[in-house]
Image: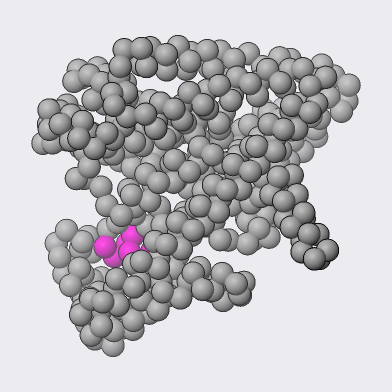
């Protein structure tokens, strides 16, 4: 009984004292924000046909659909061209801000609004990768995804270093200004009835807005030690819960995909991979597709291997070595899909979802390699522009800080 109580208390302390998986959540933040940003930039010339008010899926049809399913999309607040262009530009800026880790709490909310607004505007132009991005954009709101590899972490580390040297850290002016502007926009949208009959998204936005204001107010009072600890515990619990949900979602995607494949006759006889290789829509490299499909043995091995990996993956999480091997296989499979079938954004979304299971040691080494590469480039760039940065600033660039 004592052992059980001790184990339970340790588990509770682990969940509440720290936001787990800082490197994994940073990879998810960078991966999904980068995927969405690249998609928006690539489709910029075709944005009118995909999401514009005069596109094939007209504004009136989209309005009728969202009135029925209560899906959120800010694009239907107005059928004007200027409003559409502003929403599309804000979606790009929010994705870039989240990618860089600038004001990650606010950026994650704006990123979610951008994803939901565009995807719910035209629900027939997405694929499986868009569905994954749709869900992960919501989950990211609850994570503390700016702990490492972000501008927020750099700013916090520099502030901590300055306080350690006894220097005065200037007050943050951007955060309160951004909070006030977003509060004004949220209040205007609520009072004018823009959210319609849906309640989930406005409730989430108002809760997040109030929490950000409370966090800022408590952080300014050095004597409010206990409230600050309480808020930190709540944030850690939400982060860790969202991280578990993200991991469960990835397992569910692979498990359902694998078990549904087993029921298909084409997957049972090993010919399922052959057919998409010969569809014009999925053949950006016909020569490569012909080369791969020329061997029936290769097609059968790929089909059976895909099913086995997807079905087995959730059960391998209890064995680190086997899990890492399957992770490599799945990421390689998605990279092949990106090239052979011409589905780069689907593959990027799935690879990013897989990254939540990557070992922390590997991610740290990856971050160290990136830091060294950036340092070499920085030294080359500063040879012509002396003097170099101070040692304190260089050290702060690589220090992770709980955002």
> Going by the picture, which residue comes out furthest to the front?
1
Which coloring applies here? one colour
Provide the residue span drawn in magenta.
334-341
- Residue 389 image point, x, y percent: 74, 30
Residue 173 falls within the magenta-colored stretch? no
How many marks do you count on the picture? 0
The residue at 18%/72% (across/down) is 275
**Is residue 44 something that shows in the picture?**
no
Name the quadrant of the N terminus.
bottom right
> Going by the picture, which residue comes out furthest to the bottom?
297
**Is residue 221 something that shows in the picture?**
yes
* Residue 188 left/right relative to 77: right
* Residue 390 left/right relative to 231: right
Give the quadrant of residue 317. Answer: bottom right
In the rendered view, tell whether residue 128 sits above or below residue 169: below
In the rendered view, tell whether residue 79 sits above or below residue 50: above
- Residue 353 image point, x, y percent: 46, 55
Q: Nearer the viewer, residue 229 or 130?
A: 229
Q: Nearer the viewer, residue 221 or 24?
A: 221
- Residue 30 image point, x, y percent: 51, 44
In the rendered view, tell whether residue 350 sits above or below residue 385: below
User: What secondary structure predominates along the stretch shown in magenta?
Assistant: helix
* Residue 207 left/right relative to 288: right
Give the quadrant of residue 160. Answer: top right
The residue at 14%/62% (across/down) is 280
The residue at 61%/48% (across/down) is 240
Q: Nearer the viewer, residue 167 or 171?
A: 171
Name the quadrant of the C terminus.
top right
The residue at 50%/30% (across/down) is 107
- Residue 26 image point, x, y percent: 58, 45
* Residue 90 left/right relative to 361: left
Residue 335 falls within the magenta-colored stretch? yes
């Amino acid at each position: 009984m004592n052992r059980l109580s001790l184990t339970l208390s340790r588990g509770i302390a682990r969940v509440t004292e720290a936001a787990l998986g800082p490197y994994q959540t940073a990879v998810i933040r960078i991966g999904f924000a980068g995927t969405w940003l690249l998609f928006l930039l690539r489709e910029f010339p075709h944005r009118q046909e995909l999401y514009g008010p005069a596109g094939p899926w007209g504004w009136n049809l989209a309005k009728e659909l969202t009135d029925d399913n209560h899906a959120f999309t800010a694009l239907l607040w107005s059928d004007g061209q200027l409003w559409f262009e502003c929403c599309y530009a804000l979606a790009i800026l929010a994705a870039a801000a989240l990618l860089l880790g600038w004001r990650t709490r606010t950026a994650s909310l704006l990123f979610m609004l951008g994803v939901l607004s565009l995807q719910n505007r035209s629900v027939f132009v997405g694929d499986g990768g868009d569905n994954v991005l749709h869900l992960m954009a919501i989950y990211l709101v609850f994570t503390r995804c700016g702990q490492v590899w972000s501008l927020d972490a750099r700013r916090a580390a520099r502030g901590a270093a300055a306080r350690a040297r006894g220097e005065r850290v200037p007050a943050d002016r951007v955060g309160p200004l951004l909070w006030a502007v977003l509060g004004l926009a949220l209040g205007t949208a609520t009072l004018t009835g823009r959210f319609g009959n849906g309640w989930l998204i406005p409730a989430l936005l108002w809760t997040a807005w109030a929490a950000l204001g409370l966090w800022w107010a408590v952080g300014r009072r050095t004597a409010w030690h206990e409230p600050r600890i309480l808020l930190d515990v709540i944030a850690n619990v939400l982060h860790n819960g969202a991280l578990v949900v993200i991991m469960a979602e990835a397992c569910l995607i692979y498990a359902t995909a694998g078990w549904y494949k087993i029921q298909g006759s084409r997957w049972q006889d090993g010919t399922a991979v052959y057919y998409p290789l010969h569809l014009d829509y999925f053949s950006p490299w016909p020569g490569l597709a012909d080369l791969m499909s020329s061997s029936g043995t290769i097609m059968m091995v790929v089909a059976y291997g895909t099913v086995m990996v997807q079905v087995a993956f959730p059960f391998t999480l209890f064995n680190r070595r086997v899990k890492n091997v399957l992770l490599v296989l799945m990421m390689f499979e998605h990279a092949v899909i990106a090239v052979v079938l011409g589905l780069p954004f689907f593959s990027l979304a799935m690879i990013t979802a897989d990254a939540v299971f990557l070992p922390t040691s590997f991610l740290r080494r990856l971050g160290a390699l990136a830091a060294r590469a950036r340092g070499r480039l920085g030294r080359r760039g500063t040879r012509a522009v002396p003097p170099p940065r101070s040692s304190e600033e260089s050290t702060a660039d690589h220090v992770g800080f709980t955002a």
